[in-house]
Image: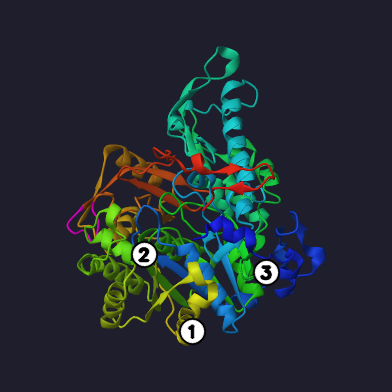
Amino acid sequence: MKTDIEIAHEAKMLHIREIAAQLGIAEDDLQYFGKYKAKLPLKYIDAEKVKSSKLILVSAISPTPAGEGKTTVSIGLAQGLNRIGKKTTVVLREPSMGPVFGVKGGAAGGGYSQVLPMEDINLHFTGDFGAIEKAHNLLAAIIDNNIQNKKNNLMIDPRTVLWKRVMDMNDRSLRKIIVGLGGTMSGVPRETGFDITAASEIMAILCLSDDLQHCKEKMGNIFVGYTYDKKPVYARDLKVNGAMAAMLKDAILPNLVQTIENTPAIIHGGPFANIAQGTNSVIATRMGLSLSDYVVTEAGFGFDLGAEKFLDIKCRYAGLDPEAVVLVATVRALKYHGGGDLKTLKEPNPDLVKNGLPNLDKHIENMKLFNLCPVVAINRFASDTEEEIEIVKERCLQLGIPACAVNVWSEGGTGAMELAEIVSKVADMCTAKYKTLYELDWPVEKKIETICKKIYGAQHVDYLPKAKNDLQKVYNLGLDKLAVCIAKTQKSLSDNPDLLGRPKDFVVTVREIEVAAGAGFIVPITGEIMRMPGLPEIPSAEFIDIDENGNIVGLS
């Protein structure tokens, strides 16, 4: 069996100007990054066309550690829709190099449902992550510089500064560090740390901005800390948001690439869903809707994380309304949530599939809470049996949800044509208008409790002392009307990664609450979730290499 990268190397890519021509984009308007990548000008966003095109969200049940192929299904579905005559663009997030070198080894789809050039997309791509990283770290440097110098000093209390630095790598040793050591000329010593770039508030802001000026304004709203006399300090007070925006001049533009079947793909932004909003940029989604009749997009991890945030944060702020939602389920994930061991998930076991169905049930219930029109896609793996697939189809039939198996890894768009027919009919016929789960003017505690109880299935929410203090800070700053972006493990519906299936009667523990005023949400951090992941015992980086001809190998 060929690997993803072998399949990618054999694919015949078209020059990016040919992909742009499919969408009606003039060659002179492209900002080239070689022959197969280009940035698109924002003038192609058409507000009226955005309203008339169909937005299809792809989410998933609670995943196994390896993921359930949500991106692969999104790409395959877009290819399938084009095969049945629907002008479709797939709009995705950019991969973070942390997971690429950590567990995943790549995040650009797989098999015959990939976005290309996969090596570039998985690594530096067009430099967006680097620009976001540097804009974020510029603010960090300006904060420390202001504390250090007497002239122009805002009298920031360094003990209140929570703005860390970021890098696009998994490195647990940087979670907590001391800066400013080395004497009076090296800064004021204080405790801080690093987050991964995908968790940066700058990433969240870029993905929720209308344009560069809006992005600059939102970055000015970033909460930095307090002065010694307890006055709040924002990035705009440091007069740095203009310089930060200048660094994002190109990063704000969405990236055009192609799938392995030459379907247009727009890839932009990459916030994680377990610690941020987990969706591509508003700009990219609007661009796709402006240039095609159907847009397939995905939200990170399970419906409880990425999809909830897509709907309650992104769609609310951007005025987007999905016409259909595809829930990706796999036999292996159902076995896992039915009590199966990770090492034996490839072995046929219909009973374990049945035991795992409550997880699927809960995610379908959650979709209905938003008044959505759902479809279930069973992402088929070679080890799945017909009996196991039929068990999942039968459950969906009982629930009145259209479902079908897809084989997009090995067949590309052909393996998703049945799904494409179902989804296009649902999108064209769906009259339901999605509704948010909560109102912004509710008390913060009620918003958090609503998500935890209705989406996760929790019995109660508990706040540790630091979270209670943080909650009071949110109210004191007048930020209690912001949306809520809960940081939670993706491995379970609960905040405990060991509670698989459909856990009940559990308590969600909020450890602390971070303020992301620029992005427009607050971040309750639950369980043991970390904003800087670590590498596994055997990281994927050990298998990634480059040969004497400059070909990258080992990505998957």
Q: Amino acid at mark 2?
A: Tyr
The answer for how far apart the CA atoms under marks 3 and 2 are is 29 Å
| Residue depicted at x 58% and y 61% | 7
Q: Earlier in the sequence, mark 2 or mark 1?
A: 1
Image coordinates of residue 232 in percent, x first then y, are 49, 37
Structure colour scheme: rainbow
| Residue depicted at x 62% and y 21% | 149
Image coordinates of residue 556 in percent, x first then y, are 51, 53
Badge 1 crowding class, 10 Å Cα cut-off, few under 14, some 14 to 19, many 20 or more, is some
In the displayed structure, 131 sits above or below 385; it is: above
Front: mark 1 or 3? 1
Badge 3 crowding class, 10 Å Cα cut-off, few under 14, some 14 to 19, many 20 or more, is some
At numbered mark 1, what does the secondary structure look like: helix, strand or loop?
A: helix
Q: Is residue 353 visible?
A: yes
At numbered mark 2, what does the secondary structure look like: helix, strand or loop?
A: loop
Image coordinates of residue 53 in percent, x first then y, are 58, 78
Rendering quarter of residue 89? bottom right
The answer for how far apart the CA atoms under marks 1 and 3 are is 27 Å
In the image, 279 versus 123, the foreground residue is: 123
Residue labelled with disc 2? 438
In the image, 125 versus 201, the foreground residue is: 125
Q: Amino acid at mark 3?
A: Ile
Magenta segment boundaries in residue numbering: 499-506
In the displayed structure, 301 sits above or below 366; it is: above
Q: Is residue 325 magenta?
A: no
In the image, 509 versus 338, the foreground residue is: 338
